[in-house]
């Protein structure tokens, strides 16, 4: 059995905040993981856990039957997946390429078409969850792609996540991820306005949050943020700049399929204005600061 046919070999591209803990979980699950990243320090860290290093994407793709990536944006996805040195052009026949990034359906379609031309399986598998959940292998994965490729990827997905949702054979997972992120980003703005209204109306901060956390609107997201909000701790689990990127993807995806996204466009505008100031690197729930400032509240 060659390495490209070894069901336990995984090629992994992208060792950021999510990629690094995922790779560690795959290693703990017994997979042979070959990694690539532009950051040599991240590669060195992964090698300490037992990963092997590929010299470039070309060599990683040629020796891995299952190629995974989790990267920042559309531009990087095009770079690693497409072109003469990319993963698709250099993957072995019968290989499957799984991208777990939050990217646009439009660019994902480009990768799908390139994969089809070469007979390579392609699975969209964006993730939902924090870095804490990534470390615990408790992420949620939304997947779409052809059934055979999904079946090949599933053992790897199970090693990094607690829930896997297969939602279709094309770009459905991309749209589901963006739909959820629309709700997440909009929730931050709506809660900020509601809290500011309550503050101006004389409510005590901690008590107001307790009641909201015990009310009909207390989603898991809201409950998760109650503690940090009480302390006004805006350490970035997911930054305002990252949310701006995701809300832009939401609006653009709506344009791509002729869906008016007026609410999403308003939320994107608010994050764009806020991220230009000193809030870009803070947690996206810190948009509260901008809403308070507009209401004349200072801390």
Image: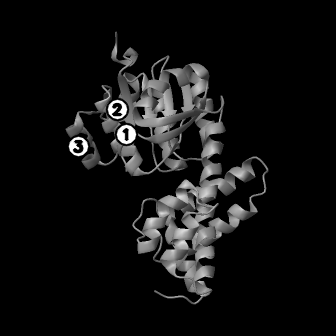
Q: x, y percentage for residue 176?
A: 64, 44
In the rendered structure, the answer to whether residue 59 lies left or right of residue 125 reads: left
Q: Residues within 10 Å of mark 2 (few under 14, many from 20)?
A: many
Q: Residue at x 57, y 90 (%)?
A: 296
Say which mark, if any, is on residue 22.
1
Q: Are marks 2 and 3 in contact (CB under 8 Å)?
A: no
Q: Nearer the viewer, residue 213 or 45?
A: 213
Task: Give the alpha-carbon distance from disc 1 to disc 2, as whole Å.
Answer: 6 Å
Q: Is residue 54 left or right of residue 82?
A: left
Q: Image point 58% across, 74% down: which residue?
A: 273
Q: Nearer the viewer, residue 84 or 32?
A: 32
The image quadrant of residue 189 is: bottom right
On the image, which quarter does residue 203 sit in? Answer: bottom right
Mark 1 neighbour class, 10 Å CA radius: few under 14, some 14 to 19, many 20 or more? many
- Which disc is residue 26 wearing? 2
> Where residue 131 sits: x, y (%)?
39, 50
| Mark 3 vs mark 1, CA separation in Å | 15 Å
Distance of mark 2 from mark 3, alpha carbons? Answer: 17 Å
> For mark 3, does the 10 Å Cα neighbourhood hold few (<14), some (14 to 19), or many (20 or more) residues?
some
Q: Which numbered dot is residue 208?
A: none
């Amino acid at each position: 059995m060659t390495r490209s046919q070894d069901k336990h070999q995984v090629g992994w591209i992208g060792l950021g905040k999510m990629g690094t803990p995922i790779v560690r979980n795959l290693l703990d699950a017994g997979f042979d993981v070959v990694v690539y990243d532009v950051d040599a320090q991240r590669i060195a860290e992964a090698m300490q856990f037992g990963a092997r290093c590929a010299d470039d994407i070309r060599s990683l793709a040629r020796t891995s039957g299952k190629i995974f990536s989790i990267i920042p944006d559309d531009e990087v996805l095009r770079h690693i997946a497409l072109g003469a040195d990319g993963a698709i052009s250099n993957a072995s026949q019968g290989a499957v390429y799984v991208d777990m990034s939050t990217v646009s359906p439009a660019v994902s379609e480009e990768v799908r078409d390139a994969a089809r031309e070469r007979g390579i399986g392609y699975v969209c598998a964006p993730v939902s969850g924090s870095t804490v959940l990534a470390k615990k292998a408790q992420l949620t994965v939304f997947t779409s792609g052809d059934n055979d490729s999904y079946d090949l990827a599933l053992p790897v997905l199970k090693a990094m996540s607690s829930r896997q949702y297969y939602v279709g054979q094309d770009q459905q997972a991309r749209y589901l991820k963006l739909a959820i992120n629309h709700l997440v980003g909009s929730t931050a703005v709506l809660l900020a306005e509601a809290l500011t209204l309550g503050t101006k109306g004389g409510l005590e901060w901690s008590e107001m949050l307790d009641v909201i956390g015990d009310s009909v609107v207390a989603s898991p997201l809201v409950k998760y943020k109650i503690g940090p909000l009480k302390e006004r701790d805006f350490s970035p689990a997911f930054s305002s700049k990252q949310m701006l990127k995701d809300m832009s993807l939401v609006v653009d995806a709506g344009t791509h399929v002729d869906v008016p996204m007026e609410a999403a466009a308003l939320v994107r505008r608010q994050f764009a204005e806020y991220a230009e100031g000193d809030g870009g690197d803070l947690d996206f729930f810190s948009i509260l600061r901008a809403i308070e400032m507009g209401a004349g509240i200072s801390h």
